Image (cartoon, helix red, strand yellow):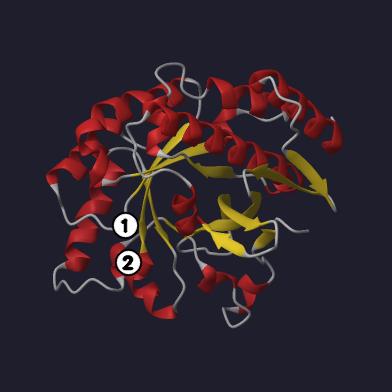
Amino acid sequence: MPLQNLVEYFNDRFGQEHRSSFRPFLVEDGTISALFGQIKIGSVFSPIRKALKPAEIVGHAAKLKVSTHDVQYLYSDEIENLLSNHPHQAGDFESIINFDRLSRTVHMLNYLPITHLQGALFLEVDPRHILGVKKDHGAYFEEVIEQCGLETKNVVIIMAVNSHYARHYQELVTGLDNYRHRGYQIALKFDYVAQESQSLDLITKLSPNYVSLSARYLDQVRDNTLFEKLQKLRTLIASAGGQSILQQVDQKESESLVLNTGFDLVQGSYYERSSAPVFLAAIPEVRISANN
């Protein structure tokens, strides 16, 4: 189905679901964006590469890039300010669910032109979305994926592990298992795991396909046993049948974490720079602006 027709389909679907004439999805210069209140949602795709063979790309992580209508850019860490910070209010769950569904649909539509690169599409889902949907997690987005002519097995659902939701971990595990039963792959995202038993138990209990850590955060950690802890963590991930990802590798210095701890996959601006090794320069980061 042509891209314009897909956009019209999702606009019609949105109108039927919300009993509204509002049509949030837009096509501009061949890229897709969507309106959510006073912001416009777009996509940026960042390659995820094999650590020891970074020229080989195994998938793309979708990131939000949004702007206000006067083209003032915002990034994912600022988007929380646009949403309620009270995770247990019913209205907030509805807002988060709508925002997640809208943004993931935009990512899926923008991903279609680069599906020939193969590999998986990594999509982050807010824990509040998982808690707000009581059953059939992934069913709504499965219809989006099928309408786009793709399969759930090529989509990785990422959940950031946050201590604020520690008492809801069992509900979150159940929700992620629901995604898995529909064929999705599962990933957990940590800033830093300092061998806390609850985090390690979560990895063992869920057996995620991927576990990622932030090199940007680890660079700030002052811990003489950091490498040892990361090696043990990687061993645990592998024993659970998963792969480890070091994300936000923006500086050459972060490479030592990769080389000394044996991470399986990497992602970050360091690998996209022209100053990186020549064999990497031929694979630039795919950027789709919300204002194109």
Instruction: Say which of 46 and 96 sits in front.
Output: 96
Q: Which quadrant, please, contains the N terminus?
A: top right
The residue drawn where x is 64% and y is 22% is 18
Q: Measure how far apart labels 2 and 1 are at the Cα level.
A: 6 Å
Residue, disc 1: 191
Q: Is residue 54 left or right of residue 9?
A: left
Q: Which amino acid type is shown beneath numbered disc 2?
A: Tyr
Q: Which residue is mark 2?
A: 217
Q: From the image, which quarter does the C terminus lie in?
A: bottom right
**Dot 2, crowdedness within 10 Å: few (<14), some or many (≥20)?**
few
- Residue 248 appears in the picture as rendered: yes
Query: Dot 1: within a 10 Å radius of its alpha carbon, few (fewer than 14), some, or many (20 or more) residues?
Result: some
Query: Which type of secondary structure does the marked residue at label 2 adopt?
Result: helix
> Which of 281/289 is in front?
289
Query: Is the Cβ of the residue at disc 2 closer than 8 Å to that at disc 1?
Result: yes
Q: Position of residue 76 (x, y in %)?
A: 50, 56
For residue 21, above or below residue 229 = above
Q: Quadrant of residue 84?
A: top left
Q: Is residue 260 above or below residue 252?
A: above
Which quadrant of the structure image shows residue 71?
bottom right
Q: How many marks?
A: 2
Kind of element beneath mark 1: loop
Where residue 139 sits in the image (x, y, percent)?
Answer: 54, 20
Sequence order check, earlier mark of 2 and 1 = 1
